[in-house]
Amino acid sequence: MTTKEKTTEVATQEEQKLLPANNSEQFTSKVLREFGSTAGAIQVTDYQRQLIQGYFIAIDRALKAAEEKRLYKNTNNSDHTYDDPNPITWNTVDLNALALDVVHYARMGLDMMQSNHLSAIPFKNNNRTCKSGTKMYTVTLMPGYNGIQYIALKYALEKPISVTTELVYSTDTFKPIKRSHDNKVESYVFEINNAFDRGEIIGGFGYIEYKEPEKNKLVIMTLKDIMKRRPEKAAGEFWGGTKTVWEKGKKKEVETDGWFEEMCLKTLKREVYSAKNMPRDPKKIDDAYQHMKLQEIRMAEMEAQELIDSNSGQIVIDIENESMTEVKEDTKPEKIPEITDSIDNQPQESEGTVSNLPEF
């Protein structure tokens, strides 16, 4: 775990201490009721309940960040005709749809308090409205690259003893050793020749090791392979290039380095831990896993997969227009809102306030 990931984990643990128990517990009960009304009654363990309470923190933080971005854009629009009038709050969230994700992923064991395990993605659903007339949002949960690693190992046909993933730079030495008549074990030679100036990224590799060395697998990706998986609408904030900023109420395109190395590594990890390279055990496949695969298909159709990996819970996607907007991360532990009335009977909040929870 990196220093950044450790810091994030400590921060989320502190948030959990600040969370009023009644809010998270009522959220858990509501989610289980909603799930039962759609998919049938289900029992969850104490640990799974704890995970769901953590989901509450992460989702609430995602909604707040997205709402702040909406308000910021509205304030800075030179023509307020284009303001977005649809608040992103608990009062406008489709809890029935959210319950399916929450319960399935809790049963899988994914933890939103862990870095890049699971991301909360709010979608504006232009086909549904609240009684107030504003659009409703569907919050979808999707695994990040650490979550995909966890899932791959959990459902693996044969669990590997070790998995190595490395980016390769122009000054590095990398030589694949393929399996042949004289060589029964696939392997590689890798050496970092200049740790302080490794040059440009030229590709990456993953090495999956098993108890029986003859089963070891080497996965190689060129930079071209990696870039093929870069979304067509990838944000410069993450992949580098240009990004849109606001200056004195006007849009401006600026150059940014983004997080190119991190994005390349995440893409590599996704490939290495894919079912293609680490086969799943059909006997282990359950409803939760099948639900996850259906969600992946849905997200792929919207060309949003990369933004999911890179920024947990910080995107609002307009289903009708397929437009994507990044929302900056709010690193401060937020005050959990008071629980109020049901979703459809709630009066809309004034702009600038944190979303209230419907009564669970």
Image (spheres, helix red, strand yellow):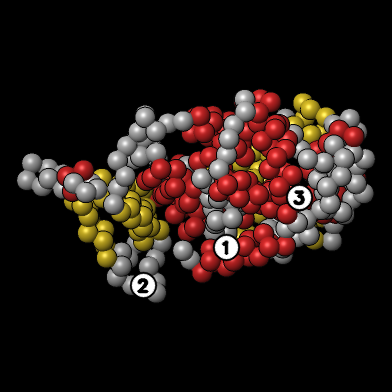
Q: Are marks 1 and 3 in contact (CB under 8 Å)?
A: no
Q: CA distance from mark 1 to mark 3?
A: 21 Å
Which is in the foreground here, disc 1 or disc 3?
Answer: 3
Q: Are marks 2 and 1 in contact (CB under 8 Å)?
A: no
Image height of 293 relative to 48, above or below: above
First in sequence: mark 2 or mark 3? 3
* Along the line of sight, the residue nearer the viewer: 243 or 17: 17
Q: How would you rate the neighbour count of disc 2 (Cα within 10 Å): few for under 14, some for 14-19, many for 20 or more?
A: few
Which is in the foreground here, disc 2 or disc 1?
Answer: 1
Can see residue 130?
Answer: yes
Q: Secondary structure at mark 2?
A: loop
Residue at the limit of the structure toward the bottom, as seen here = 196
Q: Secondary structure at mark 3?
A: helix
Residue 195: mark in rendering: 2
Q: Quadrant of the C terminus?
A: top right
Residue 238 location, quadrant: bottom right
Q: Secondary structure at mark 1?
A: helix
Q: How would you rate the neighbour count of disc 3 (Cα within 10 Å): few for under 14, some for 14-19, many for 20 or more?
A: many
Instruction: Quickly name the residue at label 3.
Output: 23
Instruction: Quickly name the residue at label 1.
Output: 9
Image height of 107 relative to 204, above or below: above
Q: Disc 1 marks which amino acid?
A: Glu
Which is in the foreground here, disc 2 or disc 3?
Answer: 3
First in sequence: mark 2 or mark 1? 1
Residue at x-position 20% and y-position 52%: 187
Residue at x-position 84% and y-position 61%: 248
Q: How would you rate the neighbour count of disc 1 (Cα within 10 Å): few for under 14, some for 14-19, many for 20 or more?
A: some
